[in-house]
Image (cartoon, grey):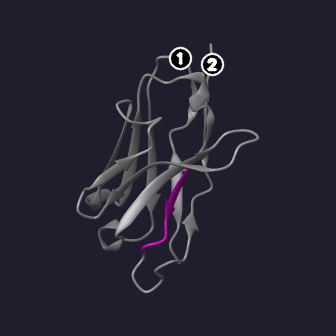
Amino acid sequence: QVQLEEAGGGLVQPGGSLRLSCAANVSIGIIYAVGWYRQAPGKQRELVATITRGGTTNYADSAKGRFTISRDNAKNTVYLQMGSLKPEDTAVYYCHTNTVPGRWGHDYWGQGTRVTVSL
């Protein structure tokens, strides 16, 4: 059973930065792609960024130029470095994958970490 655990959320002022981490209990080197999603109050969950095993990244337009997704296979961890944060970035951020070998298509989610951008 794959487990994902997010950390790093908190309260930050507009313009500030945070780094989120997603730790897996399996070798992420075998997972084809891992993504970060977020869900703001009253809104649907939306994709923020993804990274493949080969390092290819993809970002939502709202994240381009401000967020960076990366992975450290040695630590089985995926990061989301967020900068120039805005109040509209306030959300619960979730780590996700559905590309685990042998369980392709099965959704694995972390419990989420809350980010609040406010004065």
Give the x, y percent position of residue 102: 43, 86
Residue 14 point in image, percent of width and height:
53, 17
- Amino acid type for the residue under numbered disc 2: Ser
Instruction: Look at 52% across and 45% down and name the residue there.
Output: 7
Task: Residue under label 2, please give it.
Answer: 118
Q: Residues within 10 Å of mark 2 (few under 14, many from 20)?
A: some
In the image, is 17 to the left or to the right of 54? right
Q: Is residue 72 left or right of residue 111?
A: left
Magenta part of the chain: 94-99
In the image as oriented, which residue stretches furthest toward the left? Answer: 54
Relative to 115, is 2 above or below? below
User: What secondary structure prevails in the magenta region?
Assistant: strand
Tell me if 33 is positioned left or right of 2 in this view: left
In percent of width and height, residue 3 lies at 53, 67
State yes or no: discs 1 and 2 in contact (Cβ < 8 Å): yes
100 horizontally vs 53: left or right: right
Quadrant containing the C terminus in the rendered view: top right
Q: Give the Cα distance between marks 1 and 2.
A: 6 Å
